[in-house]
């Protein structure tokens, strides 16, 4: 049985060490993308912020940043990392923080956890409601049905000092639902080897469904930009000024 800390440190090791995800570079690109559309942007909300890795860099570019996250384990890790920064407990599909921001981000496909087109619209409604006029949304979608390839086993290996981690992930698809079953093995000299599994279910929305949800949320100037690692793009959109 894994502790919360195992889950969150395994998450970070798999993406930063095994997969080479570079949160610092991504934060730099996100900042440039926001400033290009809103040069005086000074506040940012990261929705589904995970363990706070993007925010740990974005806090250097924006005077005020906050995060929101559903998982208590992820939130605890983010709060520990982001000393003094508010990380709200909340659900991207239904939250109201009572203030707006110059930018709202929802990164690394977290939006795919919306389980239906209706929930996608609810999520985009919440993201847009937290933007000030002229504010910028940065959204990284999950795979579309035509991009998704089911079946191949994905294997990751990360060694960090005394900690050795492997993750094998197998996926399947039912209709527009993709399910990923992940097996983790985490070995450490002090505690031995622990095994656990996680199942993640994400919806394969089409580009048109993302586009419609963004437009119905009242955002304009929707742009599809190349992503960092694979076929997944980044989407930028702006809340019109009155
Ligand atoms: C792939 S991770 C991305 C985390 C972070 N943005 C990053 O780039 O590392 C997806 C995150 O979405 C969170 N999440 C899933 N459903 C959510 C929801 N309904 N509301 C808020 N967060 C959610 C998960 O707990 C997880 O931390």
Image (cartoon, helix red, strand yellow):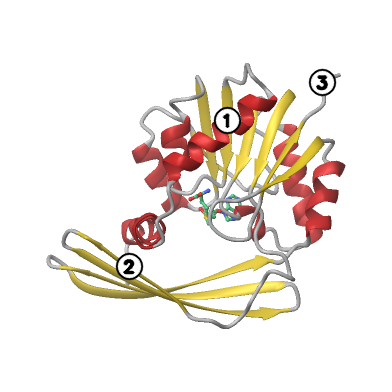
Single out the residue that lies furthest toward the front.
Answer: 226
Would you name the residue on which mark 2 appears?
Answer: 2
Could you say where residue 104 lies in the image, as x and y percent from the top left?
64, 35
The circle on residue 32 is 1
Q: Secondary structure at mark 1?
A: helix
Q: Which of the image's four quarters has the N terminus? A: bottom left
Q: Which residue is most to the top? A: 40
Kindly tell me whether mark 3's CB lies below 8 Å from ligand 1.
no
Q: Nearer the viewer, residue 229 or 186?
A: 229
Q: How many marks?
A: 3
Disc 3 or disc 1, which is closer to the eye?
1
Q: Quadrant of residue 184?
A: bottom left
Q: Is mark 1 within 8 Å of ligand 1?
A: no
Q: CA distance from mark 3 to mark 1?
A: 21 Å
Q: Secondary structure at mark 2?
A: loop
Q: Nearer the viewer, residue 237 or 36?
A: 36
């Amino acid at each position: 049985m894994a502790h919360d800390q195992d889950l969150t440190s395994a998450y970070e090791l798999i993406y930063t060490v095994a997969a080479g995800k570079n949160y610092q570079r991504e934060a730099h690109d996100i900042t440039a993308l926001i400033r290009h559309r809103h040069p005086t942007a000074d506040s940012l909300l990261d929705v589904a912020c995970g363990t706070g890795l993007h925010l740990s860099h974005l806090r250097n570019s924006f005077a005020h940043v906050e995060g929101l996250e559903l998982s208590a384990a992820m939130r605890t890790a983010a709060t520990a990392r982001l000393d003094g920064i508010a990380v709200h407990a909340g659900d991207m599909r239904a939250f109201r923080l009572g203030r707006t921001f110059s930018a709202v981000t929802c990164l690394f496909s977290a939006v795919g956890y919306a389980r239906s087109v209706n929930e996608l619209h609810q999520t985009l409604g919440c993201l847009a409601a937290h933007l000030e006029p002229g504010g910028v949304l940065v959204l990284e979608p999950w795979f579309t049905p035509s991009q998704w390839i089911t079946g191949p086993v994905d294997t990751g290996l990360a060694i960090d000092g005394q900690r050795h981690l492997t993750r094998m992930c197998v996926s399947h698809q039912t209709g527009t639902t993709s399910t990923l079953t992940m097996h983790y093995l985490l070995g450490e000299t002090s505690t031995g080897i622990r095994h656990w599994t996680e199942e993640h279910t994400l919806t394969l929305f089409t580009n048109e469904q993302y586009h419609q949800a963004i437009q119905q949320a009242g955002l304009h100037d929707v742009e599809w930009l190349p992503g960092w690692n694979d076929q997944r793009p980044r989407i930028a959109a702006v809340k019109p000024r009155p």
